[in-house]
Amino acid sequence: MTTLPPAPRPCQYCPYRLDVPSGVWSAEEYAKLPAYDRPTPEQPAKLFQCHQHDHDSGRARVCGGWAGCHDGDELLALRVATIAGEIAVETAQAIRDYASPVPLFASGAEAAVHGMREILNPGPDARRAIDKISRTRTDLT
């Protein structure tokens, strides 16, 4: 399975988007975000996929927020995925060239702090988002 390039815009509930309510995703998901801010050799070697689709579906794609927030030239995961054949060379270039049409947090750390702020007591907008995501994703527990 080859992972697709990011969508033209980060999904509606992307944890990198400034307009997404706090507390939508699990603490484990928010904990992944700051790791991609590290120097290249210290980053995770795994691509950050969009939360919109099941990870093992044929529609799995790279997260647009992740691609827009981080400098693709500095992403270890992008280098590893290209060498391993997980993504096409054209997909790697699309990630490097990606510019989000919606405002994103300046770093994974900022996105994680925002997301965790209301993790124990999500507001009404976050609860609606959680319900919607739960109906569309079959691989979440």
Image: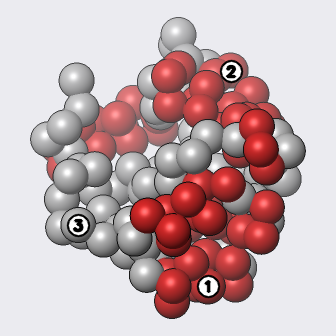
Amino acid at circle 2: Arg
Give whichever of discs 1 and 3 has the lower sequence position.
Answer: 3
Question: How far apart are the two marked residues, 1 and 3, measured between alpha carbons?
Answer: 18 Å
Location of residue 58 in the rendering, given as x and y in whole percent from the top left corner: 18, 67
Which is nearer the N-term, disc 1 or disc 2?
1
Q: Tell me the tag on residue 93.
A: 1
Residue under the point 24% across and 32% down? 140
Q: Amino acid at mark 1?
A: Gln
Q: At which x and y percent is residue 83?
A: 51, 68
Tell me if label 1 and label 2 are in contact, CB under 8 Å.
no
Front disc: 3 or 2? 3
**SS of the residue at dot 1?**
helix
Is any part of residue 53 visible from this angle? yes
Q: Residue furthest bottom?
A: 90
Q: CA distance from mark 1 to mark 2?
A: 34 Å
In the figure, 95 relative to 125: above or below?
below
Q: Position of residue 7 (x, y in %)?
A: 46, 76
Q: Is residue 53 left or right of residue 30?
A: left
Quarter location, residue 66: bottom right
SS for dot 3? loop
Question: How far across and down, in percent of the image, does residue 81 sit?
Answer: 49, 63
Q: Which residue is mark 3?
A: 1
The residue under the point 85% across, 44% down is 39
Q: Amino acid at mark 3?
A: Met
Q: Quadrant of the N terminus?
A: bottom left
Given residues 36 and 20, the one toward you in this image is 36
Q: Which residue is mark 2?
A: 117
Give the number of marks.
3
Is residue 89 shown left or right of residue 117?
left
